[in-house]
Image: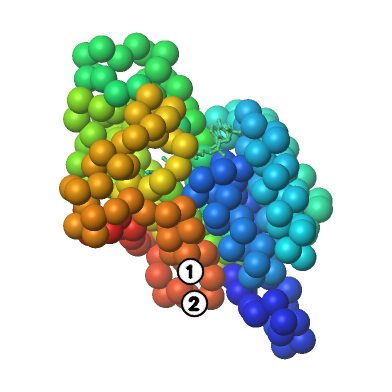
Amino acid sequence: MTMQNPSDKTSQPPPRAVIVTGGSRGIGAAVAFRLAHGGHPVCVNFHADAGAAGRVVERIERDGGCAFAHCADVADEDQVRALFDTCERRYGSLGGLVNNAGILDAQMPLAEMSVARMRRIVDINLLGALICAREAVRRMQRSRGGQGGAIVNVSSMAARYGAPFEYVDYAASKGAIDTLTVGLAREVAADGIRVNAVRPGLIETQIHASGADPGRVARLRTTIPMQRGGLPDEVAAVIVWLLSDASPYTTGALIDVAGGR
Ligand code: NAP
């Protein structure tokens, strides 16, 4: 997928559109800003907070970029189809997907968890990513008339350490994201689509408050070899690199962005 200097508009085809799920805040918003700065039209997906998504779009437009916000629950097949259709109608051929939308819930051992909670985690974190990846592949596959492209899945370091006593359900959903990344990458490599994942460590976003632990990053700071939490933009930089033509031979990779944790 072409990334170009916004001031050099003569020599290359225009950057293609990218859908960022959960683009309204945190890591997703940082990715949307970077992509728009690189000249990509961006679809900022959100589910609950229209105001936050609107503010991301406003900032992108103020900086001269191109974006729109679209409400869709990634776990709902019809809503995801409508998300992709709307993006293609507005911006033409899709160049990339960032499967970023994700949730966690309050910390507890598995023995205490309700099935409703587990289902919600798996539906949004895993089923949502599968549905979005399927829609992206259908539209980008060269064998179906697409132009190729790139998918980046947002996993977590929890996939490696399992998050015992906190959220094993969340960690398991992210482990499955890693497997999805490796399998799908091999499935579509010859069809012009690269699929990679990033595994963020402890990043300063609002997700920790939703796990009823807003001070989590500060509390665990000393367990991180770099002695600090990460910033959303430090994850976004790697995601945008994986989407770009600067990583043409990288597929099926799982890249830790975790300060050495
Ligand atoms: P965040 O600040 O809580 O943002 C989550 C985003 O997902 C919001 O834009 C939210 O929008 C959206 N979202 C939630 N449910 C959705 C649904 N059903 N459909 C569509 N969008 C939905 O989280 P973050 O920290 O930036 O996390 C982004 C990704 O990074 C997640 O996959 C997370 O698991 C992963 N990650 C984060 C960390 C970390 O330390 N922050 C570490 C490892 C991995 P609405 O509020 O409008 O629904």
203 lies above or below 252? above
At label 1, which amino acid type do we have? Trp
Discs 2, 1 touching: Cβ within 8 Å:
yes
Q: Residue at x 22, y 20 (%)?
A: 109
Q: Residue at x 34, y 35 (%)?
A: 215
Circle 1 — which element? helix
Query: Is 183 placed left or right of 189 in the picture?
Result: left
Residue 116, quarter of the rendered image: top left
Query: Is 25 placed left or right of 217 in the picture?
Result: right
Residue 104 x/y as whole percent? 40, 30
125 lies above or below 147? above
Q: Residue at x 53, y 75 (%)?
A: 245
Instruction: Quote the CA–CA distance across marks 2 and 1.
Output: 6 Å
Circle 2 — which element? loop
Question: Do we see residue 73 in this rendering?
Answer: yes
Residue 174, quarter of the rendered image: top left
At label 2, which amino acid type do we have? Ala
| Of the image marks 2 and 1, the number of the one nearer the N terminus | 1
Residue 170 x/y as whole percent? 34, 32
Q: Which residue is mark 1?
A: 241
Q: Which residue is mark 2?
A: 246
Relative depth, front residue between 181 and 209: 209
Q: Residues within 10 Å of mark 2 (few under 14, many from 20)?
A: few
Q: Residue at x 73, y 74 (%)?
A: 14
